[in-house]
Amino acid sequence: MTLLHRIPLWLKLVYTAFMAVMIPVYLYRYGPTNFLYFCDIALLLTLAGIWLESPLLISMGAVGILLPQLVWVIDFIANVAGLPVTGMTDYMFEAQRSLFLRGLSLFHGWLPFLLFYLVWRIGYDRRALPAWTLLSFIVLPICYFFLPPPQPKPGLMPVNINYVWGFSDHAPQAWVPPDVWFAGLLFGLPILVYWPTHLLLRRFMLQAASRQAD
């Protein structure tokens, strides 16, 4: 059995239909900088990855966002219960965001499970760790040095993209100096998030080369 067509056609079509709605809506409501969020980058990589059936593209998304998006899921459930943990999902409960926009943003909840399934289907590509790490070294400085920091009333404007100023979109974190926070994020993510995810996927998933040999 060849690697081609390991991902069901119906899944490709459903995912593409979702993206066909989400991309123009997000461009109109939030602007192009919104697509610098790691979760949105993972969405775009996954769109290309499912059609190309590319283990590298899909594995990159998995390495980059599996753990952070699971934290999002936990925080969202906690917020529903009235016990927010990190503040990551506070925006999901802001009245100025329409139910439609918040509904689209629920992709944060299902994307990590979809990526886990896709990696299981086509195998894990070890090159994902250096590839995603390099991408994050490019994206994070752009977010920190050139894009808006937290604002008291940001509205729908993307601010504090990828939490380069802290977990809140309304005020910077005050625990450490901003540059220290940013440096910790820049180098801490590869060590504390990407590397452990890479080890788990390498340990428990068949490698891409093995999948091709089926």
Image (spheres, grey):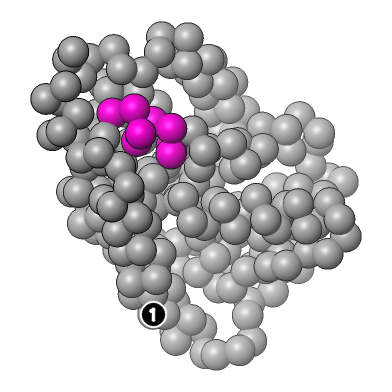
Q: Residue furthest bottom?
A: 176
Q: Amino acid at mark 1?
A: Ala
* Residue under pointer 1: 183
In the rendered image, residue 174, in percent from the top left (x then y), is placed at 64, 87
Query: What secondary structure is the stretch in magenta mostly built from?
Result: helix
Is the residue 53 above or below the residue 9 in the image? below
Say how many tags the image has: 1
Q: Which quadrant of the figure has residue 146?
A: bottom left
Left or right placement of residue 32 versus residue 52 in this view: right
Left or right placement of residue 122 versus residue 171 in this view: left
Report if residue 73 is visible in the image: yes
Front residue of 116/80: it is 116
Front residue of 201/12: it is 201
**Is 190 one of the magenta-colored residues?**
no
Q: Residues within 10 Å of mark 1 (few under 14, many from 20)?
A: some
Front residue of 116/69: it is 116
Q: Quadrant of the N terminus?
A: top left
Element assignment for label 1: helix
Is the residue 197 above or below the residue 4 in the image? below
In the rendered image, residue 119, in percent from the top left (x then y), is placed at 34, 36
Front residue of 174/66: it is 66
Tell me the magenta residue range.
115-122
Left or right placement of residue 141 versus residue 156 in this view: left
| Rendered residue at 81%/36% (across/down) | 98
